[in-house]
Amino acid sequence: MGLEAFHHSEPLTLGVELELQLVNTHDYDLAPYAEDMLRLMKKIPLPGSVVPEMTNSMIEISTGVCHSSSEVLGQLIPIRDALVKSADKLNIAVAGGGTHPFQQWHERRIYDKPRFQELSQLYGYLSKQFTIFGQHVHIGCPDADAALLMLHRMSRYIPHFIALSASSPYVQGQDTQFDSARLNSVFAFPLSGRAPFVLTWEAFGQFFDKMTRTGVVKSMKDFYWDIRPKPEYGTIEIRVFDTPLTIERAAALAGFVQSLGAWFLADQPFMPEEDDYLVYTYNRFQACRFGLDAVYVDPSTGEHMPLREHILQTMDRIAGHAATQGATGALHLLRGEASAGQNDARWLRECQREEQLLAEVSRQAALRFRGVN
């Protein structure tokens, strides 16, 4: 079976998926309530969808096709409110964050769905360690070749996405010293990393055929790349974001992606090159480890600068496109927090410094998701 044809989508449309934590309300550890939640959520007419994820203490929500970040937020609000209501009925809570601060991965149970069971058999303990929570942003592309060009242009901004969304400093009760420890679990998978540097759908098809011939992959789903094409939607899907603690931040990150995409399409500001990837892994590591305090190496000039500075410069450059897309407010929210060095990882650490109890941090994160604090 060859590569699927790239379907038509409206350029710059957005779709957002969020993987969320289900926690009990006595010690705020993860709770295996996915099935009960799905049963309750089925009864409520909502935009988008709610589906199970790899283990039964997580759930994934997604929007339908949106034209702006405010539309993304407009869809996430009723889904969030319905989730909170359903969780209250079950006496559990829902929280964002890229990792649960103190859950023990070996206690997790794989959700009973053939694909998840298959992955569990293949990846062993890695599949339980995959109890991590990400935000995926889809952006519509004019055609298949344009999608690959968009993918490789976006790759320069992977560190920006990581630092702005980082919300996973704690793993199994320990401060990892990383702002985004979640991505360390993703990098353990053999087909993670980046897409091959090809700029035509034909060349991508040849790569895909070679990979399927080896028997290592069966479909695009088997690639855990940072950004991957989604031919069935006519989009590229950016997968490096930690799930933020609030839906407002999730929508703002989608607005940032859309503004970058609009800039790429309108101005064609640079041509990506294979050499961009010489600094890719270093930049990505810096952003995971240090968040907004990371160093960014510019792929085209080799210049080293604070990532935070590059984020603010980028936002200045794309401000006009953001305005056209209705994303000025989204960029304003992210810009304010970037200048202050304030991402969700820092919020979680400050909360722990004050409370000295990770269960309380989880409780407050769940309140934050509800929009209470």
Image: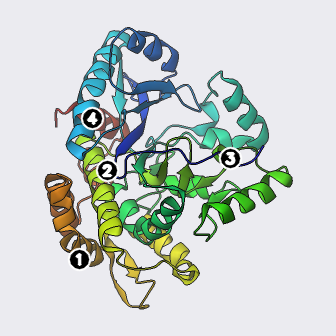
Image vertical order of residue 279 relative to residue 240, above or below? below
Residue beneath disc 2: 254
Looking at numbered disc 1 in the image, what kind of residue is underneath it? Gln
**Residue 340 seen in the current view:** no
Looking at numbered disc 4 in the image, what kind of residue is underneath it? Phe
For the residues labelled 3 and 1, the Cα–Cα distance comes to 35 Å
Q: For marks 1 and 4, give the one nearer the viewer.
A: 1
Dots 3, 1 in contact, CB < 8 A: no
Q: Earlier in the sequence, mark 3 or mark 2?
A: 3
Image vertical order of residue 82 relative to residue 192, above or below? above
Q: Earlier in the sequence, mark 4 or mark 3?
A: 3
Tell me what residue is drawn at x 63 percent, y 38 percent: 128
Q: For marks 4 and 3, give the one nearer the viewer.
A: 3
Q: In this view of the protein, which residue sits in the foreground, 85 or 107?
A: 85
| Quadrant of residue 15 within the rendered picture | top left
For the residues labelled 1 and 2, the Cα–Cα distance comes to 18 Å
Residue beneath disc 3: 222
